[in-house]
């Protein structure tokens, strides 16, 4: 299998664990059922953490606990233990509810991509702010509303609503936060021209005093930067131009060598790009810093990264591209941590009183599997709905009160039917570079015979 390798030769030795060797660490991911799952780094054993099907994104602390973003559009976070028990549910200062029906109202969007600190006490997340103001010089001098989209990072306690200034204020500009330790926070993708690609904040010192403008490269987009725990390597997602004369850009994972921590810019060593030139996303380092896991079109891949110290800025031996441990049909958004994958779940405590009657049915009648935004825009958003018999299901996805996607399907009998929502050209164009979108999906079932109509709704957050 040939991979794109740049700025390095393929004749270097690789420091990687023996295939099938035992490992005490784990990789969490979001299953297509919107639950949190764990896998051993070799993909040999999986463990289902949650069963509620409510999560769009999660990261794990060193002790194996989680912070997770709810997938229902409520913009709230869950603190979870290793077994999926909810320890806390809370909002953030940017959790101001659904996008206004009037798209010209000022509003926040977020929190997105929450990353929990190694000690589990803090969470950093991305946010956006849409603002509108009248500009008399716009629209050819006739005046009209001007839109400004700002982004940044904020930090919260991991178990409660936290004010902006609790950790020195919000960190404007760069987003996609990743903790290096319990104080150092790497951020990337400033969203504006001429800015540095990657910066580091020492959170305890505040936004300005703790900012290190670390790396700037003359190239296409660089985002999702993450530094290994040893502070010797960095991985990020970048883009390289496609064929001359086209606007195509292919994403890949670029590996850097850190020559002097954050006191010197990192040195680019090599680049991985899938053969099918699919999207790559969400890099995460192994605790020992010898491997990196990330999303690609085929699924979650684990790539060995050789020792880059002592001037050895080299690529994996013989172009070793690692292997996919979780297929794309099973899960997305990996996050590597030092806690082991559980082998069993603790037994539930015995009831201490008379049993309480449960709901008549716990079956979910409308579910939306975990799908990335870019995949949904390209191939549609699948919606699964339980139908009582033969009939027609129509589904509509709306954002800011506007129809963004629609679809319909016919059921021949009772069961579960999948309706694929296709996005409008306007939505595809507007959201081509967006990282997060919240949709309200409404479905209508009309039976083949009779006039009865059943309507159901669900909210979903699609992330990049």
Image (cartoon, helix red, strand yellow):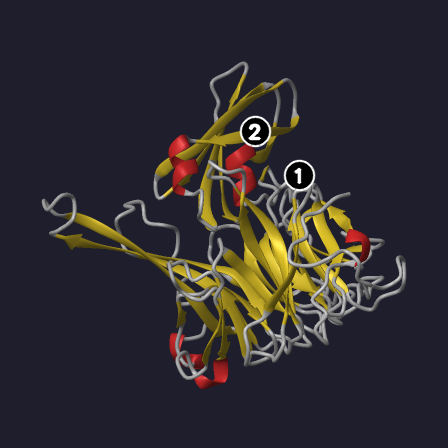
In the image, residue 211 above or below residue 293: below
Label whose residue precedes the other's in the sequence (1 or 2)? 1
> SS of the residue at dot 2?
strand
Lateral position of residue 295 relative to residue 306, left or right: left
- Which residue position is annotated with label 1? 276
Classed neighbour count for the residue bearing mark 2: other residues with Cα under 10 Å, few (<14), some (14–19), many (≥20): many
> SS of the residue at dot 1?
loop
Residue at (66%, 45%) from the top-left corner? 33
Q: Position of residue 135 (x, y in %)?
A: 15, 53
Q: Mark on residue 404? A: none
Q: Which image quadrant for residue 258?
A: bottom right
Residue at (80%, 63%) from the top-left corner? 341
Can residue 303 be seen by looking at this rendering?
yes
Residue at (74%, 67%) from the top-left corner? 352
Q: Position of residue 111 (x, y in %)?
A: 47, 61
Rendered-image quadrant of the N terminus = top right
- Which residue position is annotated with label 2? 419
For the image shown, how many numbered marks are present on the structure?
Answer: 2
Is residue 273 or residue 327 the one in the foreground?
273
Q: Position of residue 458 (x, y in %)?
A: 50, 42
């Amino acid at each position: 299998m040939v991979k794109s390798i740049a700025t390095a030769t393929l004749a270097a030795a690789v420091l990687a664990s023996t295939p099938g060797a035992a490992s005490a660490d784990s990789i969490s991911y979001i299953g297509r059922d919107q639950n949190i799952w764990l896998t051993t780094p070799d993909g040999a054993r999986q463990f289902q953490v949650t069963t509620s099907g409510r999560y769009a994104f999660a990261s794990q602390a060193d002790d194996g606990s989680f912070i997770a973003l709810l997938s229902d559009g409520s913009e709230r976070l869950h603190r979870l233990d290793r077994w999926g028990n909810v320890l806390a549910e809370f909002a953030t200062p940017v959790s101001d509810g659904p996008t206004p029906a009037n798209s010209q109202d000022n509003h926040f969007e977020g929190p997105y991509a929450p990353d929990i600190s190694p000690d589990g006490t803090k969470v950093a997340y991305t946010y956006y702010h849409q603002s509108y103001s009248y500009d008399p010089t716009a629209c050819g001098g006739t005046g009209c509303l001007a839109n400004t989209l700002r982004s940044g990072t904020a930090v919260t306690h991991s178990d409660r609503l936290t004010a902006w200034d609790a950790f020195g204020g919000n960190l404007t500009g760069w987003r996609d936060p990743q903790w290096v330790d319990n104080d150092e926070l790497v951020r990337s993708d400033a969203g504006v021209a001429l800015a540095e690609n990657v910066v580091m904040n020492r959170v305890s010192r505040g936004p300005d005093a703790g900012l290190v403008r670390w790396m700037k490269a003359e190239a296409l987009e660089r985002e999702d930067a993450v530094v290994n725990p040893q502070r010797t390597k960095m991985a990020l997602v970048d883009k390289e131009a496609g064929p001359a004369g086209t606007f195509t850009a292919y994403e890949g994972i670029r590996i850097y060598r850190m020559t002097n921590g954050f006191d010197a810019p990192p040195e680019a060593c090599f680049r991985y790009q899938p053969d099918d030139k699919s999207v790559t996303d969400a890099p995460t380092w192994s605790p020992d810093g010898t491997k990196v896991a990330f999303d690609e079109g085929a699924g979650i891949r684990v790539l060995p990264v050789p020792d880059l110290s002592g001037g050895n800025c080299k690529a994996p031996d013989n172009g070793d591209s690692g292997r996919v441990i979780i297929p794309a049909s099973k899960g997305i958004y990996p996050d590597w941590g030092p806690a082991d994958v559980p082998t069993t779940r603790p037994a539930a405590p015995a009831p201490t009183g008379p049993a309480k009657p449960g709901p008549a049915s716990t079956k979910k009648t409308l579910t939306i599997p975990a799908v990335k935004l870019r995949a949904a825009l390209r191939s549609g958003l699948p919606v699964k709905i339980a139908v009582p018999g033969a009939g027609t299901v129509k589904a509509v996805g709306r954002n800011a009160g506007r129809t963004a996607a629609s679809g319909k399907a016919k059921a021949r009998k009772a069961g579960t039917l999948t309706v694929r929502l296709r996005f409008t050209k306007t939505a595809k164009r507007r959201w081509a570079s967006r990282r997060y979108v919240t949709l309200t999906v409404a479905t209508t079932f009309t039976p083949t015979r009779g006039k009865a109509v059943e309507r159901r709704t669900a909210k979903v957050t699609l992330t990049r």
